[in-house]
């Protein structure tokens, strides 16, 4: 019963917030934009006779009234109208330019912040991939060929890298939380842009795939213990390390593609495409399609 009441209150609150946002947007559009002010004026002009006893002058009546004025009044009224109209146009142009510049700065800042987080994530995933692949191959080689530990110096190198591997696992968890927080940090900026929210969710999904595989058994690390090679050999499971290596590599490839898409979506309103860019993109698309067709024929 209590849970049902809470759900009803949340549903009512969501509806109220949605209606409030729509009302605020309409008021801002009607009173804060040039087209909105023109539309509001037209609605007042044509709707005033229906809600009151007043009837605005028609254009013909306004022209006749202006014609009956004296020359000084005509000059003063015309100059005032020109001054007010020029000030209004200049103010609107300045505000529009300022808004565009501010939006471009915010997009570039968001693109740099996301690029920094995702680039570090890719670097960490690359280190995890290289370490786990090397560890799995070396352990499998030593076990299958029954190589003496004195003849496997790579185990010592890998033992030193274990410390960095442990730190990378913790860093992946931290970056995952940073990726989750990005949509909330730039929510207002992401709303009018399509695809960024889903792309960040896809990045977080790829990271979650890695985190499910990365808690493999790992030795203490370091080479201070005289039996560190044996400890490393006994602690590493080649199968799980190979799975983690493959998962890290696949996630890194997909995240790299998503990273470029996110940055392009953020900067595309700032750096608009021109004829030269279109002329270069079209041949690239045809070459890619031709390569895909050749690959299918070979398969």
Image (cartoon, rainbow, N blue to C red):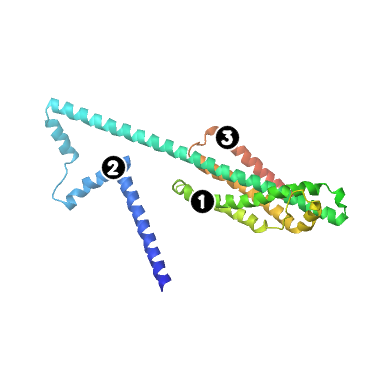
Q: Earlier in the sequence, mark 1 or mark 2?
A: 2
Q: Earlier in the sequence, mark 3 or mark 2?
A: 2
Determine the secondary structure under disc 2: helix
Look at the image and tell me whether residue 118 can be seen: yes
Report the mark closest to the observer, 3 or 2. Answer: 2
Q: Earlier in the sequence, mark 1 or mark 3?
A: 1
| Mark 3 residue crowding within 10 angstroms, few (<14) / some (14–19) / many (20+) | few
Q: Position of residue 33 (x, y in %)?
A: 33, 41
Which residue is disc 1 drawn over?
181
Can you give x and y, in whole percent of width and height, for residue 223 in the image?
A: 77, 48
- Quarter holding residue 143: bottom right
Query: Quarter of the image holding residue 241?
Result: bottom right
Could you say whether the residue bearing mark 3 is in a helix, strand or loop? helix
Q: What residue sits 47% from the left and 51% below the top? A: 184
Cα separation between marks 3 and 2: 41 Å
Judging by the rendered image, the residue that carries numbered circle 2 is 37
**Structural crowding at the residue carrying mark 2, measured as other residues with C-alpha within 10 Å and reported as few (<14), some (14–19) or many (≥20):** some
**Mark 1 to mark 2: distance in Å?**
38 Å
Residue 197 seen: no
């Amino acid at each position: 019963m209590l849970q049902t009441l809470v759900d009803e209150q949340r549903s009512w609150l969501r509806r109220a917030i949605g209606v409030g946002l729509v009302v605020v947007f309409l008021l801002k559009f009607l009173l804060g934009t040039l087209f909105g002010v023109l539309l509001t004026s037209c609605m007042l002009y044509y709707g005033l006779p229906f809600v009151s006893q007043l009837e605005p002058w028609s254009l013909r009546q306004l022209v006749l009234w202006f014609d009956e004025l004296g020359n000084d009044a005509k000059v003063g009224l015309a100059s005032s109208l020109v001054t007010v109209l020029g000030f209004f146009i200049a103010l609107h142009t300045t505000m529009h330019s300022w808004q565009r510049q501010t939006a471009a700065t915010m997009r570039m800042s968001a693109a740099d912040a996301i690029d920094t987080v995702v680039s570090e994530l890719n670097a960490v995933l690359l280190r995890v991939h290289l370490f786990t692949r090397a560890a799995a191959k070396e352990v499998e080689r030593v076990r299958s060929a029954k190589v003496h530990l004195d003849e496997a110096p790579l185990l010592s190198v890998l033992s030193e890298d274990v410390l960095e591997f442990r730190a990378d696992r913790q860093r992946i968890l931290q970056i995952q939380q940073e990726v989750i927080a990005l949509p909330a940090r730039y929510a207002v900026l992401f709303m009018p842009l399509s695809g960024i929210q889903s792309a960040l969710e896809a990045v977080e999904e790829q990271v979650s795939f890695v985190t499910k595989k990365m808690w493999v058994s790992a030795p203490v690390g370091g080479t201070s213990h005289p039996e560190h090679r044996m400890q490393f050999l006994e602690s590493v499971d080649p199968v799980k390390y190979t799975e983690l290596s493959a998962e890290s590599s696949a996630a890194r490839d997909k995240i790299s593609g998503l990273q470029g898409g996110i940055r392009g979506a953020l900067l595309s309103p700032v750096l608009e495409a021109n004829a030269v860019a279109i002329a270069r993109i079209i041949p690239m698309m045809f070459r890619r399609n031709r390569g895909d067709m050749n690959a299918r024929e070979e398969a």
